Amino acid sequence: MTISHRAGLDLAAGATTGDAGRILVSVLARHGHALSTAGFHEWFTEQARRTSFTVEPIPFTALSGWSFDPRTSFLVHETGKFFSVQGLHVRRDRGLVPQWWQPIINQPEVGILGIVVREIDGVLHCLMQAKVEPGNVNGLQLSPTVQATRSNYTKAHGGAGTAYLEYFVQPGRARVLVDVLQSEHGAWFYRKRNRNMVVEVTDDVPLRDGFCWLTLGQLRALHALPNLINMDARSVLSCLQYAARDSLPVTPAPGDDFAAALWRSTAVGEATGSVYTEGEILTWLNDAKTGQILDARRIPLDEVAGWHRTADRIARPDGKYFSVMAVSVHASNREVHQWTQPLFAPCDTGVIAFLVRRIDGVLHVLAHATVEPGYMDVVELGPTVKCVPANYDGLGEEYRPLFLDYVLSGRGRVRYQTVQSEEGGRFYHSESRYLVVEVDDDFPAEPPEDFRWVTVGQLIALQRHSHYVNVQARSLVSCLHACW
Amino acid sequence: MTISHRAGLDLAAGATTGDAGRILVSVLARHGHALSTAGFHEWFTEQARRTSFTVEPIPFTALSGWSFDPRTSFLVHETGKFFSVQGLHVRRDRGLVPQWWQPIINQPEVGILGIVVREIDGVLHCLMQAKVEPGNVNGLQLSPTVQATRSNYTKAHGGAGTAYLEYFVQPGRARVLVDVLQSEHGAWFYRKRNRNMVVEVTDDVPLRDGFCWLTLGQLRALHALPNLINMDARSVLSCLQYAARDSLPVTPAPGDDFAAALWRSTAVGEATGSVYTEGEILTWLNDAKTGQILDARRIPLDEVAGWHRTADRIARPDGKYFSVMAVSVHASNREVHQWTQPLFAPCDTGVIAFLVRRIDGVLHVLAHATVEPGYMDVVELGPTVKCVPANYDGLGEEYRPLFLDYVLSGRGRVRYQTVQSEEGGRFYHSESRYLVVEVDDDFPAEPPEDFRWVTVGQLIALQRHSHYVNVQARSLVSCLHACW
């Protein structure tokens, strides 16, 4: 017996047992049992309509509670909590740029990004939140159940309380499916990591205003829409193990070879048809980590060479990379808020892309051993291309990121292309074009040393541990499932 | 058919296939095919006899090539390589000490600690080196095949060359069995990690002077001797996976229940009789990491409050913890050397202990979620007890490490007790009493929140990845096999 969930993919009987099987059923469930996808869009539009939210750039002197510390020149909050903007001096013994200076966000505390899941009519559904963030280009985006820094949620214990937090911090309240500290943008955060969690609840969960239940199948389809699934949600969803066994119990229909290759790529374990073993990938990563020295030392913000502070920006004269700014936020929906805070604003739209290819029927993605100064351990696996193209204007050809021109040229077959946002709580209007491009047959089989063909299942297995897969690659893993 | 390797443990036929099986055969091989254990001792004594090595404490001004940088006050080498002694300011929001200052070693480059293995008469043997280090209390200790910092081995490429290095850095020269970046002492090193490797060679390997081939069984027996197997060797050996399957194909004899419980404890995978799943251990570690903030910032060495620099020491007036000193080294064996360098000298002998207990026939060790300022990510799994008892003299009872008194009291059954050295390349006469103590039945089953009962197999599985198991716990994993 097979259960047909959509044309092209059949789920073998018996596949629905175990967590991986139950996750798979939810991935294949295009229709929600709590809310239809049309119903979701109505609900989300209504949420947006009821959300009055204004964000205004302000000069640094208009910040309330935030100031430049006279001793360190760091931009800090008076409580010492939340985060601070510090200076960073980076030295490398590889690459074209031997040293540079930049502002960086230091947020030593770890937040929780958590999704509550629950079976509804036997299918796992995710409890998602429609949430505004000051840097969001469109205000409202779909977020995890809980998205809270420790400063927020510990303070909240004495106050209104973060909704649903108890399922993540009270032992025994829920069963843990995913629990891993993941890095965020290593170019803008100093060693930040957030706790990515998925927990399953079996008793009744009250549905609060601003929240909804969606299947994983609904969520993956929503990845096709621009700026809807926020970065934190993409990161958490990418950590779910879709297949615990060597081969997936899914039968693709003839003619949908790409979906079949993608499914085979998500398999976890031995003999999955990957070009390299996990051991070989770890050795390659260790080669990358140990073949170079990157020393990142925090320094006073005033000593960041090449950057200048004006009344309302810390920026470079050439306008490249990003700037530090401040905003005043007014939110007039049910949870009334008014506050000011600093944000990082990128200079332009980014390009974040996986080149993919089928190798013996298994989809492989071209991962890049990415170096960023804020990583805990020098290197993490990233997308094939991750950059803001405008940063390379006027620079020599040798500075141009590898494969950027391939992606921009329109060669290959674009399997996914959607503008997605980065974290709106810290970044102002940070958008990137996310792409999955299947390369032509004439693409070289042997990539340069810093690149390797890996399967999606290998990425997901590594995501069980910290410091392996960077936030942009995790986002793309999440987006990949919108390809079929 | 079973192959009897020693009284008490039989190896089932068919167990010798696969890497784990072949490692197991070597673990059970008490007699070497290259060198008998008696022959090893003769060889080692001869090596020691031929090694003339003097180490003399000197004032800092007598250091050659090393000086206090006038800008940072760091103690640095003129080449900018090797390592430097810097200051550290540590702030915590948990524990009895909210902040402190200390000197710390910064060594941003990653060294290689590598063992070459090769089958001799069908049994894997390890190529070990008799090596002197300036801080070694006894001069010569048994080291991995290669034990080299990047400064040493990259410089060596143009010079004499590090023996056997090619097997670790030239692709295709050997097959990788272990390759993982592991942390070292987080109390004395700022985010240092070394690459722990084991590689298998199938072609002929020339045996150079100062090297010998030993089985894993011979090496585990040698762990019973004080200060023989050096810290680096213990660390690398602990990463070997002794069992890839759910249950070990070893039949313990009646009456050797401890050995049987230890063997069952080394099993890796599902259903191994562990109290907690790996997921539960990871969640507990994430709780420990995220439930506190530890911010460690490097500062000028002159600004380390409470520490004073004299002509030949940087130390505290109370003499506690450790001091920074300098030595002049003369080595007159075949590889002639004379150099000076700084070393860290602990104030007294340490105690490093695992409490262990059998739970449903499976040995569990009581791991501690250990916090040290030099760890990459706040917390790693450490021994039950790891401290220098003298540091707690005169302090209140509340400062005393948990379970230290249990270990010192002679309660329980001591299964292993040997003085072992820490890294002699950076530490001067750093010795600790390493113990494995089986607790009495009246020992509380539920340990305090920062402690968990875990199996040896769980530790070994976590050691496949970085930042999980600290160097002292890895040492104890290596020593555990000398218990039977």
Image (cartoon, coloured by chain):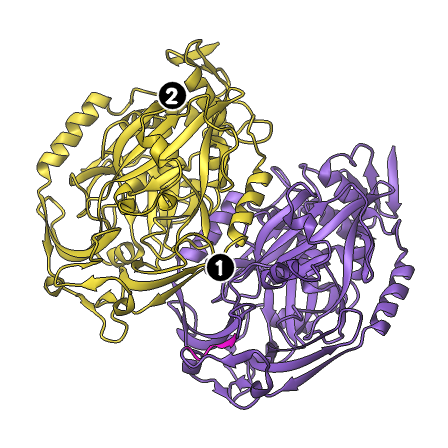
Chain colours: A purple, B yellow
Going by the numbered disc 1, the residue's amino acid type is: Val
Q: Position of residue A242 (x, y in %)?
A: 71, 45
- The 10 Å Cα crowd at callout 2, few under 14, some 14 to 19, many 20 or more, is many
In the displayed structure image, the side of residue B361 where residue B105 appears, left or right = left
The chain identifier of the residue carrying mark 2 reads B
Q: Secondary structure at mark 1?
A: strand
The chain identifier of the residue carrying mark 1 reads A
- The 10 Å Cα crowd at callout 1, few under 14, some 14 to 19, many 20 or more, is many
Going by the numbered disc 2, the residue's amino acid type is: Leu
Magenta stretch: give its range.
A72-77
> Which residue is located at x 25 percent, y 59 percent?
B155
**Is A51 situated above or below B359?**
below
In the displayed structure image, the side of residue B300 where residue A329 appears, left or right = right
- Which numbered disc covers residue A379? 1
Res B422 → quadrant: top left
In the displayed structure image, the side of residue B423 where residue A61 appears, left or right = right
Kindly tell me whether residue B120 is visible in this rendering.
Answer: no
- Which numbered disc covers residue A122? none
- Quarter occupied by the C terminus of chain B: top left
Q: Nearer the viewer, residue A465 or B449?
A: B449
Is B338 magenta? The answer is no
> Which residue is located at x 86 percent, y 73 percent?
A49
Q: Secondary structure at mark 2?
A: helix
> Which residue is located at x 85 percent, y 51 percent?
A30
Q: Nearer the viewer, residue A335 or B259?
A: A335
Query: Which residue has dot 2 on it?
Result: B28
Q: Position of residue A262 (x, y in %)?
A: 72, 50
Res A210 → quadrant: bottom right
**Is B470 situated above or below A319?**
above
In the displayed structure image, the side of residue B24 where residue A324 appears, left or right = right
Res B128 → quadrant: top left
Q: Position of residue B77 (x, y in %)?
A: 22, 65
